[in-house]
Image (tube, rainbow, N blue to C red):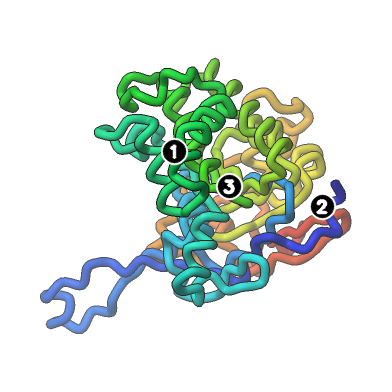
């Protein structure tokens, strides 16, 4: 499939998300301004039909906030998210229910996202019933098909989530998402809570299902090797912003942004030529309560200049389906 010529399924256009902090009576009386966490700032992204878009970055960079915004769980304070050209914030009634069915999220915690008092059969029945996927008489056979699809035994239908391992619970979460016949899967740290031996099984299952069902996937993760394995394109986030986006092969072979270079340099198992690059991560991620002026990475970038400290770089296109937010890349 040629993803380059496809019309995007999802489009993220200049999206910002802020979370206001509690405004105490003492702060009001003394005239202090209200403070807010700036979780996302001017994010631009597209997801094409049938592709996997990886989202990487340090903890606290806004990956999960973006994932939740894509499925409508986090509202935006600025900008728009479009699904097939429709602003999801404007969807109401049947249109909203249709969006909720077609864009599904699989959460990081495979146990916390499942109702511990419901059997697997009840969990899947609820999903099928709420979205009117099939007549009630067909639900048992549909559940058997779903369990087979994610390679769980048929007797799982009568068991509670606590009876399963972490990898099996994540398969239940995948089956619940697939039950409603989605077009897009947003996987937020899908395997981060699982053992390494189980991670490969779940990821390979997702790849197989994507090919068979023609799914588009947003894959949020901090494991750079895993993202390289599964993604067609990769977006790198830093402090609520996308600082680089490129085809996976290009990004891993020739990262342009100093932050991307630093991430790859610090990650084990990559080409040793990356070790010779002059960029390494130093210091802590700045607080989103008071992000740095100019380029947000300048406080940790050894190549930063006065221009970086004063002028905010715009995510700009580069040759080869790439974009980068750096004055000197």
Instruction: Give residue 271's position: percent from left, percent from top.
Output: 76, 27
Q: Which residue is mark 2?
A: 3
Q: Quadrant of residue 266?
A: top right
Mark closest to the chain's N terminus, 1 or 2: 2
Q: Residues within 10 Å of mark 1 (few under 14, many from 20)?
A: many
User: Which of 135 and 105 lies nearest the eye of the viewer?
Assistant: 135
Mark closest to the chain's N terminus, 2 or 3: 2
Query: Does the rendering let one see residue 3?
Result: yes
User: Which of 105 and 223 lies nearest the eye of the viewer?
Assistant: 105
- 117 with respect to 113 (left or right): left
Q: Is residue 205 above or below residue 53?
A: above
Q: Which residue is mark 3?
A: 181
Which residue is at a point 33% across and 30% down the rendered structure image? 119
Q: Which residue is mark 1?
A: 108
The mark total stands at 3
Instruction: Give residue 258's position: percent from left, percent from top.
Output: 68, 49
- Circle nearer the viewer, 3 or 1: 3
- Circle nearer the viewer, 2 or 3: 3
Q: Is residue 47 above or below residue 201?
A: below
Which residue is at a point 63% across and 48% down the rendered structure image? 259
Q: Is residue 66 above or below residue 1?
A: below
Q: CA distance from mark 1 to mark 2?
A: 28 Å
Which residue is at a point 45% across and 31% down the rendered structure image? 172
Which residue is at a point 51% across and 53% down the rendered structure image? 67
Instruction: Give residue 159's position: percent from left, percent from top.
Output: 34, 23
């Amino acid at each position: 499939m040629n993803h380059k010529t496809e019309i995007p399924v999802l489009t993220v256009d200049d999206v910002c998300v802020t979370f206001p902090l509690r405004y105490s009576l003492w702060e009001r009386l003394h005239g202090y301004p209200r403070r807010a966490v700036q979780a996302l700032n001017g994010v631009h992204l597209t997801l094409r039909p049938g592709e996997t878009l990886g989202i990487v970055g340090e903890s606290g960079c806004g990956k999960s906030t973006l994932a939740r915004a894509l499925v409508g769980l986090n509202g935006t304070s600025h900008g728009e998210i479009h699904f097939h050209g429709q602003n999801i914030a404007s969807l109401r009634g049947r249109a909203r229910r249709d969006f909720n069915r077609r864009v599904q999220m699989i959460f990081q915690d495979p146990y916390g996202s499942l109702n511990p008092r419901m059997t697997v059969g009840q969990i899947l029945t609820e999903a099928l019933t709420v979205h009117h996927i099939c007549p009630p008489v067909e639900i048992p056979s549909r559940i058997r098909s779903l369990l087979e699809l994610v390679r769980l035994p048929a007797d799982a239908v009568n068991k509670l989530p606590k009876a399963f391992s972490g990898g099996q619970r994540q398969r239940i979460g995948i089956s619940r998402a697939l039950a409603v016949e989605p077009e897009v899967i947003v996987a937020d740290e899908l395997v981060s809570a699982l053992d390494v031996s189980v991670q490969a099984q779940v990821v390979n299952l997702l790849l197989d299902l994507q090919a068979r069902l023609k799914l588009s996937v947003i894959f949020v993760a901090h494991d750079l090797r895993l993202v390289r394995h599964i993604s067609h394109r990769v977006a790198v986030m830093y402090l609520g912003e996308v600082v680089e986006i490129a085809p996976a092969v290009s990004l891993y072979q020739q990262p342009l942004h100093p932050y991307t270079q630093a991430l790859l340099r610090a990650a084990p198992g990559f080409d040793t030529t990356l070790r010779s690059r002059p960029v390494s991560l130093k210091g802590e991620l700045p607080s989103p309560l008071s992000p740095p002026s100019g380029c947000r990475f300048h406080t940790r970038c050894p190549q930063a200049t006065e221009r970086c400290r004063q002028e905010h770089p715009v995510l700009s296109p580069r040759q080869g389906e790439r974009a980068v937010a750096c004055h000197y890349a």
